């Protein structure tokens, strides 16, 4: 066996909430063969596998009686190109933001709005990462994955991934069945800028940008994010803890009876998206601290660990928030973060 396996290993450095739980077994995989070894080891112990990238979208509520595998499959290269696109293949263990920077450096357009999202490339398809009006689905070509139960390798086409708002087949029907090994992107030779998001426009103006470039958009996004979002290295968090609820226009009309100022963003002719952060703030949670758990003082969608919070305490806080938003607004918030 060439992989190194540690027993009863602290996961504190491997999740951005900084929750101190132990993995029964822990290993790092740098290749397909490492992954196959980890799978065989887990089978021999009759344990499940849990794959982690950067641990920036998980909340551990207990010790993990599993084989935790840190995916570190690397590599990024242009595999094909045509008149309009570069087809770029990226190992699942690559750091997402470093890949965005590589893209900007090489003039591969399409992911500049997704700058500074923590974590690894392989987790991107899990929840169809999105920010500032762009989602992974806008640039995804296909996803290569290894089946944990059958060792089959499969290439999921964009359609097969069943991507939605913070959703995918990997987060739903096929949860826990596949290890994503490589993500294939279809990036643009000529940028199609998406700067309608108010904050980006304002930031570009502040930066005195005359000629728009993917680099300028990325810088604007990084600037906004750094000023609003807590850095997990300083304050444990996993970004937005809840999804923004999508409701029907009829439901929105009822919501307006309760609070005429609730913002909304059209999703289709029949549905709108409501910012969960607004609802949570209006229920009085913004900036609150209970023991070591808290709600961020600038963005109520983000739960934080002020020190030694336990995962279960953060989960309990999230349940209180869900209940109070439901009582005030009759909307049931859903968690975005993956609980283990
Ligand atoms: P992990 O937390 O390691 O894993 C998340 C889930 O994916 C787990 O269920 C895990 O088992 C699974 N997984 C990970 N890798 C693989 C793999 N190779 N194969 C199969 N399953 C796998 N998200 C957004 O969408 N938009 C944002 O703007 C955004 N901003 C954030 C800002 C902050 C400050 C933080 C802390 C988080 C933010 N997030 C955002 C959430 C998070 O960064 C993303 O969801 C990211 O893609 C998670 O990557 P990760 O490698 O850390 O995943
Ligand atoms: P924000 O700009 O304060 O806006 C609050 C919410 O309203 C956002 O979540 C966004 O939904 C929605 N919204 C705002 N302007 C919109 C527009 N013009 N069109 C459509 N929807 C709009 O949000 P923020 O917290 O600072 O985050 C900025 C962006 O980064 C968002 O896209 C957000 O999703 C992303 N982000 C995600 C995470 C995460 O962990 N998932 C963490 C931090 C930031 P959407 O979220 O659907 O865009």
Image: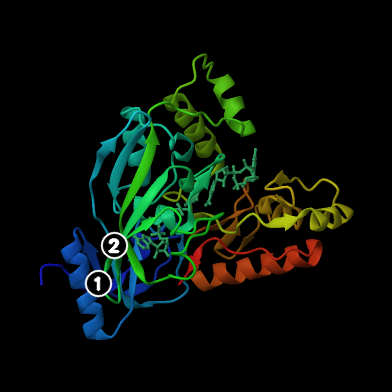
The CA span between labels 1 and 2 is 18 Å
Q: Image quadrant of residue 145?
A: bottom left
Please give left or right for residue 200 compared with residue 189 in the image: right
Residue 203, percent across and down?
57, 26
Q: How many marks?
A: 2
Can you say which quadrant of the picture contains the C terminus? bottom left
Q: Quadrant of residue 292?
A: bottom right
262 displayed left or right of 200: right
Label 1, ligand 1: CB separation under 8 Å: no
Let me know if residue 188 appears in the view: yes
Residue 317 x, y percent position in the rendering: 62, 67
Residue 268: percent from left, percent from top = 69, 48
Res. 5 in view: no
x, y percent for residue 249: 79, 53
Which quarter holds ligand 2? Answer: top right
In the picture as drawn, the residue positioned furthest to the right comes out as 257
The residue identified by callout 2 is 70
Mark 2 within 8 Å of ligand 1, using the beta carbon = no
**Up-down relation of residue 302 to residue 224 (above or below):** below
Q: Which residue is mark 1?
A: 151
Which residue is at the far front?
83
* Placement of 32 over or under 196, stated as above or below: below
Secondary structure of the residue carrying tag 1 is loop
Above-or-below relation of 210 to 96: above
**Which residue corresponds to the image point at 62% horizontal and 48% vertical from the top-left?**
299
Disc 1 crowd rating (10 Å Cα; few below 14, some 14-19, many 20+) is some
**Circle 1 or circle 2, nearest the eye:** 1
The N terminus lies in quadrant: bottom left
């Amino acid at each position: 066996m060439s992989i190194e396996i540690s027993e009863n290993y602290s996961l504190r450095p491997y999740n951005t909430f900084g929750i101190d739980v132990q993995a029964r077994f822990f290993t790092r995989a740098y290749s397909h063969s490492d992954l196959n070894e980890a799978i065989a080891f887990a089978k021999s112990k009759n344990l499940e596998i849990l794959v982690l990238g950067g641990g920036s979208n998980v909340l551990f509520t207990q010790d993990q009686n599993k084989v935790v595998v840190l995916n570190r499959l690397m590599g990024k290269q242009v595999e094909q190109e045509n008149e309009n696109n570069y087809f770029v293949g990226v190992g699942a263990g690559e750091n997402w933001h470093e890949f965005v920077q590589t893209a900007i450096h090489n003039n591969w357009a399409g992911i500049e709005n997704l700058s500074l999202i923590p974590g690894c490339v392989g987790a991107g398809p899990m929840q169809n990462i999105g920010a500032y009006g762009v989602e992974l689905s806008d640039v995804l070509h296909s996803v290569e994955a290894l089946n944990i139960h059958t060792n089959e390798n499969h290439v999921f086409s964009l359609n097969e991934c069943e991507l939605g708002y913070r959703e995918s087949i990997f987060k739903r029907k096929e949860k826990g069945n596949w290890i994503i090994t490589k993500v294939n992107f279809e990036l643009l030779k000529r940028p199609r800028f998406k700067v309608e998001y108010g904050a980006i426009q304002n930031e570009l103006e502040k930066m005195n940008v005359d000629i728009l470039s993917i680099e300028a958009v990325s810088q604007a996004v990084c600037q906004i994010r750094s000023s609003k979002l807590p850095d997990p290295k300083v304050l444990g968090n996993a970004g937005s803890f809840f999804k923004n609820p999508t409701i029907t226009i009829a439901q929105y009309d009822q919501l307006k009876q309760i609070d005429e100022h609730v913002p909304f963003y059209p999703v289709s002719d029949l549905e709108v998206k409501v910012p969960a952060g607004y609802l949570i703030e209006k229920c009085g949670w913004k900036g609150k601290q209970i023991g070591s758990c808290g709600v961020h003082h600038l963005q109520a969608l983000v739960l934080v660990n002020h020190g030694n919070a336990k995962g279960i305490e953060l989960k309990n806080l999230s349940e209180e928030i869900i209940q109070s938003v439901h009582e005030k607004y009759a909307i049931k918030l859903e968690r975005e973060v993956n609980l283990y």
